[in-house]
């Protein structure tokens, strides 16, 4: 029987190749979806920790502390500290652009991050040597040995390019461009004195067996650091939250992709079900037992499934890593989770095996004769199933939209049911369409419609194509949503400027008096943590009540109440409607707010709505921050009345002596978003690649199904039908299939998008409904058109194989 | 068969596409090719800039015909050989190429030419010149070390080259009488230098070996000296304190403390890097250099200055650990009140106006600042700690080498400064040291002489003598004048400079050296005793000095409108503690 199995494989090499390829592609798709979130986490982790590197704790100066510090003797003597890496970091200007220069002590330049040199000067680093990234070198047209004059306020210092490095490590977060040098020369730039030991950040590595929290407490007890900020160098919780936010839409869509993959494999094998049933009949007629037949099927399909799983594994790793390197970073090391790889391969293998045995098991139920003439018993429950599916979907939709407490959960249920209903119903719709089109007077259309309504392969193809198209549309919508979520609010800031590195004592009226300044407010711009009974969430602190007049908030609570609360002497905070929808908080609730390590009880004073930070913000007055938290303003937000760039330049010039860091908000966000942009690219690439895979698998399945009808086509040609007519017929069949798929998918995509947005609440994201019809339409139309042209591609030579009947 | 071909083709096409895709990703490494290195070109520019800066008629790579017509042809040949050696050192060093270009451009500018001119007539130092172009301490140490090493290694080759060239140019058809005369003088001098200056094979091997062993230690010393020189500390701290702009505008007391601590800590870290073995290597190398090259003319001002720096380094290298201990105590004891006091003082110095400023008030405030610091430091170091420092300085003073006694003698001079100044200010020429029974007036004068003036005179005498030699002076007028003024009381020189200049010269040098050695040895024990007595007096029970110091330390800096009576009261404490004089000295130094 093994020989029979091998003979079967050899007799249809193209089909076997197609099946193996499809299984491999599905395995790759499943692996991509399983690994996507982890890859994004690793990338965000590397970007966010670019400066902290391998350190665990960082001591930083603040706006109301000394601007410089040094490593004190008590710090060196703390138990549990493995290494201390002081650093002097300032923003300086090169050729009119801000750059960040970071200096380390001699011999400690690579203590936190390894520098991967592309090229390097001879000898050791001098105190005025700097290392830059290759993208920085390209941007400023710098080469090894070039002299750079950096200015900071009225100070300037010369540096020389010692090394050009890959965009990894420190340079992964290269926006603004990072320069790495020695701290004494950076200190000279900042203070005029080139002495070792002056720093404004101290990175600390904790011994593996020491407790980081207790080391932090010991540091905070040292007099020299009492006024400074002592915090964890790498906020893994924040990174995780950021990853969840970025990946949520794709993760949700990914579940559908994985389910689709499984369905694909199943349908792939069922395409040739009829043929296999007849084959079983032949063997049984020749005297083979059930066991022998089963052995043959198992042997044949083990080979196909195993090949598909193995090739799929190789393709998964290569393809996924290629996508990561092209979009996220060519230099971050991404781990390949062997378990997920095995899981994806195992799913592919198991589903393939199971699906491949269905025809055999089906054949065992019937007699040899029944199997040979392929009598199909119609199920009485035929129409009932789609009806039930639709009803269930409708019920789920109603619950989702009406009962807010379970909206998120039922959104997932709705998505699953909607896809299921789509898959079940679209075949019927195609057959119905076929039956309607039979009434046409055109012979080609008649013949084509007859085929559509009669042949099961079209039902399977339309199911595959519709579900595949819908899932692709979902992926593209997820891409569009992700970009919209994180980009949508940025335009609100286009006429705004940040001034940071300020001293808390800066007189705000001096800023307001400058040209082109419409308004300005001193505020705390920081990150914090909000804690209720049920949830702890990282949020962005907007520490000034003036922000209410600067941005266009929608008032859910009354405007008067909100403004009264934020001006009050009580510790009121204003939150976004997202908090209310997600966690059920309401006005008057007491929650805990932690800012710069200080936790206090605050009261919710009002609810607003804005896309700002996807709703992850609180507004609190700077006066309350100072009186209750002891935190002073560290930033000034300026609104310009005219040319924002010119306003920023004016401010830079006016306050150059103070070394304030003046940057347009859009520019600052661009720096913050540089890592997100890479993630957006990745999502887009995955969407395109997966859509392509879906399309390839769909087409392959169709072709496999088509190949089983080759005798029929040959018979038609032999009977006198012209090749042109046959081609036209096939075109109509594929076009109708594609059209039905597109229409149904487009309609369902609206519901799916709405449910997707609701389901994001499971990830702590709240949004109003948004839908980019053009994204959906384009992706659908492209797939539909390409699918329609498959017959043309297959028969471009207009050669039909006339098989001897 | 056809089907098989189709399948095979399909598989191959897919494989090709996949491979191409991965290759594109895998091989996407941008290798940035550097610009062609212009280092040699920059060094050539540097050489041209130096030569033309020294003399507008000079240039790089002048051929014999061009040299022969110069009136300073001999000078040109010698100087250009040294300049070539310097530029070769620069080219082989780790100095960034861009810096060489900056240096060359600077020396080619008017400002650079003026500085070169000052340097060539000894009115400014080598370090002043290098400081102008933002060279770091590492650059300086690398260049100085490299130049010394190369000189020892290549001096013979260089000297032979000079001699051969001078001989060739002398016989050149275009040589003018003036040129020939200049060449003849230089040939004579270089031949003399050749025998004295160029080390023999054994000396060379010894020196190169010693230099290699001492490389890291010499580098640390040079970096320390360059980077933490008094000028740079006060200039930088003053500019930070008084600056109204920059990253540390309106600098706080705590921030100044951070800067001062960092500066002092840098010095303290030198102590750990200078082990006993390291110090021994440095001493050996410096000793060899000084012994070989101090008594001869190198005909290179650069080398001569380096030898001078080597002598300074040789004097203090053993005392570096003690200096670092003091600086470390300084860093640990700076607090906000001390910073505030010195901040006020520095601001007063910066804003000094002859007509409106109250000098007495400034000195009194200076005393308050000093008292705060000294009170804390002395409490930390304690009597035993300070005595240990004195003992250490004493033990490291080699009585057979007058240079090694410098640190302990300077310490005693500073300790006696108050007594001396008080008497001098009182108009009395019969000043008294603090402990005349240990250090008499004559002894003290002699100590100043052997530590400062006589040594300086000796160095000037040597330089003047070789300048006279180079200029072909028959009467050696410059060096004679110096010798008469400075050495006639000490050395009886029977030789006539006009007839036996070399013997005349060596008699003075050997005589003064013997004198220095004799008196350094003679007074060493007394100086130690004197210092110990100072310590004793400070720490003894009921000590007036200590009590006055601590009383002053508890007082606040006086404002501009302080009543005269208060200023007078403070002044009394300042005088009793002896800090009034030191405050005066400090203000003078800060004003400089």
Image (tube, rainbow, N blue to C red):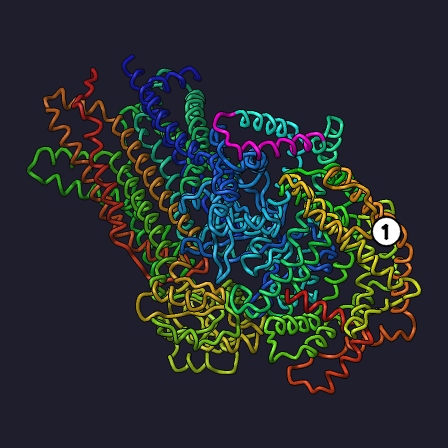
Q: Residue A656 versus residue B138: which sits nearer the camera? A: B138
Tell me the element at label 1. helix
Crowding near the residue tagged with mark 1, few <14, some 14–19, many ≥20 C-alpha atoms within 10 Å: many
- Residue sitting at x 48%, y 62%: A153
Please tell me which residue is depicted at 29% across the width and 23% down the height of the picture: A372
Point out residue A152 in the picture as x, y percentages from the top left corner.
49, 59
Residue B482 shows in this picture: yes
Residue A339 sits above or below residue A524 on the image: above
Identify which residue, A412 or B419, lies in the foreground: B419
Q: Is residue A333 visible?
A: no
Residue span colored magenta: B172-195
Membership of B191 in magenta stretch: yes
Q: Where residue B111 appears, x then y in whole percent?
A: 49, 52
Question: What's the magenta bit mostly, secondary-structure-wise?
Answer: helix
From this view, report whether residue A632 is shown above or below residue A467.
below
State the residue in front, A315 or B179: B179
- Point out residue A305 in the picture as x, y percentages from the top left corner: 43, 28
Which of the image's four quarters has the N terminus of chain A? top left
Residue pointed to by mark 1: B520
In reply to whether residue B285 is colored magenta, the answer given is no
Count of numbered marks = 1
Residue for point 35% across, 72% down: A515
| Picture quadrant of residue A216 | bottom right
**At 36% across and 25% down in the image, what residue appears?**
B16
Q: Is residue A281 left or right of residue A624?
A: left
Left or right: residue B331 compared with residue B94? right
């Amino acid at each position: 029987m093994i020989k029979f199995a091998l003979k079967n494989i050899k007799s249809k090499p193209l089909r076997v190749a197609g099946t193996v390829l499809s299984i491999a592609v599905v395995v790759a798709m499943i692996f991509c979806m399983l690994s996507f979130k982890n890859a994004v986490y690793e990338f965000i982790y590397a970007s966010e920790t670019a400066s902290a590197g391998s350190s665990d704790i960082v001591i930083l100066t603040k706006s109301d502390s000394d601007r410089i510090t040094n490593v004190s003797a008590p710090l060196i003597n703390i138990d549990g500290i493995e290494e201390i890496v002081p650093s002097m970091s300032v923003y300086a200007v090169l050729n009119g652009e801000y750059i960040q220069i970071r200096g380390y002590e001699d011999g400690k330049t690579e203590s936190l991050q390894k520098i991967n040199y592309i090229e390097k000067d001879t000898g050791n680093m001098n105190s005025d040597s700097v290392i830059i990234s290759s993208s920085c070198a390209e941007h400023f047209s710098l080469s090894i040995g070039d002299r750079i004059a950096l200015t900071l306020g009225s100070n300037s210092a010369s540096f020389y390019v010692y090394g050009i490095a890959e965009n990894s490590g420190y340079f992964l977060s290269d926006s603004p461009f990072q320069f790495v040098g020695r701290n004494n020369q950076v200190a000279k730039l900042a203070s005029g004195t080139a002495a070792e030991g002056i720093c404004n950040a101290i990175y600390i590595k904790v011994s593996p067996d020491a407790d980081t929290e207790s080391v932090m407490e010991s540091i905070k007890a040292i007099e020299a650091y009492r006024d400074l900020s002592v915090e964890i160098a790498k906020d893994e919780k924040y990174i995780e939250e950021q990853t969840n936010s970025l990946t949520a839409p794709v993760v949700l869509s990914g579940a559908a992709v994985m389910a689709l993959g499984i369905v694909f494999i199943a349908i792939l094998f069922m395409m040739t079900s009829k043929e296999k049933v007849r084959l079983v009949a032949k063997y049984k007629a020749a005297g083979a037992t059930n066991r022998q037949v089963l052995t043959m099927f198992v042997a044949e399909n083990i080979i196909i499934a195993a090949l598909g799983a193995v090739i799929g594994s190789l393709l998964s790793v290569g393809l996924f890593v290629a996508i990561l390197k092209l979009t996220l970073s060519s230099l971050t090391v991404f781990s390949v989770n062997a378990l997920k790889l095995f899981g994806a391969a195992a799913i592919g293998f198991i589903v393939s095996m199971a699906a491949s045995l269905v025809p055999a098991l089906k054949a065992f139920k019937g007699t040899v004769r029944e199997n040979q003439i392929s009598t199909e018993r119609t199920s009485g429950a035929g129409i009932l199933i789609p009806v039930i599916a639709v009803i269930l979907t409708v019920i789920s939709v109603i619950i989702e939209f009406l009962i807010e407490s379970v909206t998120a959960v039922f959104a997932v249920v709705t998505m699953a049911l909607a896809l299921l209903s789509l898959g079940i119903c679209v075949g019927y719709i195609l057959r119905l369409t076929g039956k309607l089109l039979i009434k046409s007077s055109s012979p080609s259309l008649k013949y084509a419609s007859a085929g559509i309504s009669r042949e099961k392969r079209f039902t399977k193809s339309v199911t595959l194509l519709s579900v595949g198209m819908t899932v692709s549309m979902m992926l593209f919508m997820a891409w569009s949503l992700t970009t919209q979520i994180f980009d949508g609010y940025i335009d609100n800031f286009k006429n705004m400027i940040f001034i940071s590195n300020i001293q808390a004592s800066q007189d705000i009226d001096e800023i307001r008096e400058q040209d082109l300044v419409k308004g300005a407010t001193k505020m705390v711009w920081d990150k914090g943590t909000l804690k209720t009974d049920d949830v702890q969430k990282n949020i962005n602190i907007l520490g000034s009540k003036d922000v209410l007049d600067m941005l266009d908030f929608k008032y859910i609570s009354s405007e008067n109440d909100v403004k009264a609360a934020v001006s009050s002497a009580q510790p009121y905070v204003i939150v976004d409607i997202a908090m209310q929808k997600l966690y059920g908080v309401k006005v008057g609730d007491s929650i805990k707010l932690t800012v710069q390590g200080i936790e206090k009880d605050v009261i919710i004073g009002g609810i607003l709505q804005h896309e700002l930070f996807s709703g992850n913000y609180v507004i609190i007055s700077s006066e309350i921050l100072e009186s209750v938290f002891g935190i002073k303003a560290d930033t000034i937000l300026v609104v310009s009345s005219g040319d924002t760039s010119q306003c920023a330049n004016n401010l830079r010039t006016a306050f150059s002596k103070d070394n304030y860091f003046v940057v347009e908000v859009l520019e600052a966000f661009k720096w913050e978003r540089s890592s997100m942009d890479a993630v957006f690219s990745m999502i887009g690439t995955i969407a395109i690649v997966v859509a392509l895979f879906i399309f390839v698998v769909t087409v392959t399945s169709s072709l496999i199904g088509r190949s089983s009808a080759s005798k029929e086509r040959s018979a038609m040609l032999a009977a006198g039908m012209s090749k042109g007519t046959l081609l036209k017929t096939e075109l109509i069949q594929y076009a109708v299939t594609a059209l039905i798929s597109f229409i149904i998918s487009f309609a369902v995509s609206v519901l799916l998008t709405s449910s997707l947005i609701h389901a994001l609440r499971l990830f702590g994201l709240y949004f109003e409904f948004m839908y980019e019809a053009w994204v959906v339409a384009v992706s659908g139309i492209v797939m539909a058109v390409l699918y329609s042209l498959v017959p043309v591609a297959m028969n471009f030579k207009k050669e039909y194989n006339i098989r001897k009947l | 068969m056809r089907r098989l071909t189709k399948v095979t083709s399909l598989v191959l096409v897919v494989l090709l596409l996949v491979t191409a895709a991965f290759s594109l990703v895998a091989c996407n490494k941008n290798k940035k090719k550097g610009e062609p290195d212009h280092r040699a070109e920059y060094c050539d520019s540097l050489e041209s800039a130096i030569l033309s800066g020294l003399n507008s008629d000079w240039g790089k790579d002048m051929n014999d015909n061009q040299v022969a017509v110069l009136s300073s042809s001999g000078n040109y040949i010698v100087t250009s050989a040294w300049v070539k050696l310097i530029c070769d050192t620069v080219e082989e060093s780790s100095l960034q190429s861009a810096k060489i270009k900056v240096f060359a451009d600077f020396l080619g500018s008017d400002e650079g030419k003026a500085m070169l001119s000052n340097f060539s007539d000894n009115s400014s130092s080598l370090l002043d010149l290098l400081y102008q172009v933002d060279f770091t301490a590492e650059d300086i140490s690398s260049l100085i070390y490299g130049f010394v090493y190369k000189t020892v290694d290549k001096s013979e080759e260089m000297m032979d080259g000079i001699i051969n060239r001078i001989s060739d140019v002398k016989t050149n058809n275009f040589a003018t009488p003036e040129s020939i005369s200049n060449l003849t003088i230089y040939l004579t001098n270089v031949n003399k230098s050749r025998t004295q200056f160029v080390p023999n094979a054994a000396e060379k091997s010894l020196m190169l070996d010693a230099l290699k062993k001492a490389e890291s230690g010499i580098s640390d010393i040079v970096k320390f000296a360059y980077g933490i020189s008094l000028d740079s500390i006060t200039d930088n701290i003053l500019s930070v304190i008084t600056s109204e702009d920059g990253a540390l505008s309106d600098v706080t007391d705590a921030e100044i403390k951070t800067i001062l601590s960092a500066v002092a800590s840098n010095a303290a870290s030198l102590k750990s890097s200078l082990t006993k073995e390291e110090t021994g290597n440095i001493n050996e190398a410096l000793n060899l250099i000084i012994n070989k090259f101090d008594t001869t003319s190198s005909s290179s001002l650069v080398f001569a200055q380096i030898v001078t720096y080597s002598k300074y380094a040789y004097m203090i290298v053993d005392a570096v650990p003690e200096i670092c201990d003091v600086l470390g105590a300084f860093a640990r004891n700076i607090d906000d009140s001390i910073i505030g006091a010195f901040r006020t003082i520095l601001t007063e110095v910066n804003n000094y106006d002859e007509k409106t400023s109250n000098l007495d008030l400034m000195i009194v405030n200076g005393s308050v600042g000093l008292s705060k610091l000294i009170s804390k430091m002395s409490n930390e170091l304690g009597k035993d700690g300070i005595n240990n420092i004195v003992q250490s300085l004493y033990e490291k003073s080699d009585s057979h080498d007058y240079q090694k006694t410098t640190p302990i003698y300077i310490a005693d001079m500073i300790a006696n400064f108050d007594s001396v100044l008080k008497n001098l200010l009182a108009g009395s020429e019969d000043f008294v040291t603090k402990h005349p029974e240990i250090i008499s007036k004559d002894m003290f004068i002699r100590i100043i002489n052997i530590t400062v003036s006589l040594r300086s005179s000796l160095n000037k005498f040597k330089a003047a003598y070789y300048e006279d030699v180079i200029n072909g002076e028959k009467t050696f007028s410059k060096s004679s004048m110096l010798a008469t003024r400075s050495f006639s009381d000490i050395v009886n020189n029977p030789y006539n400079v006009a007839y036996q200049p070399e013997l005349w010269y060596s008699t003075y040098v050997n005589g003064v050296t013997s004198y220095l050695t004799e008196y350094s040895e003679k007074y060493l024990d007394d100086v130690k005793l004197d210092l110990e007595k100072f310590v004793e007096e400070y720490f003894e029970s009921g000590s007036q000095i200590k009590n006055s110091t601590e009383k002053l330390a508890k007082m606040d800096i006086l404002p501009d409108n302080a009543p005269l009576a208060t200023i007078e009261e403070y002044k009394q404490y300042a005088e009793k503690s002896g800090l009034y004089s030191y405050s005066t000295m400090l203000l003078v130094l800060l004003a400089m």
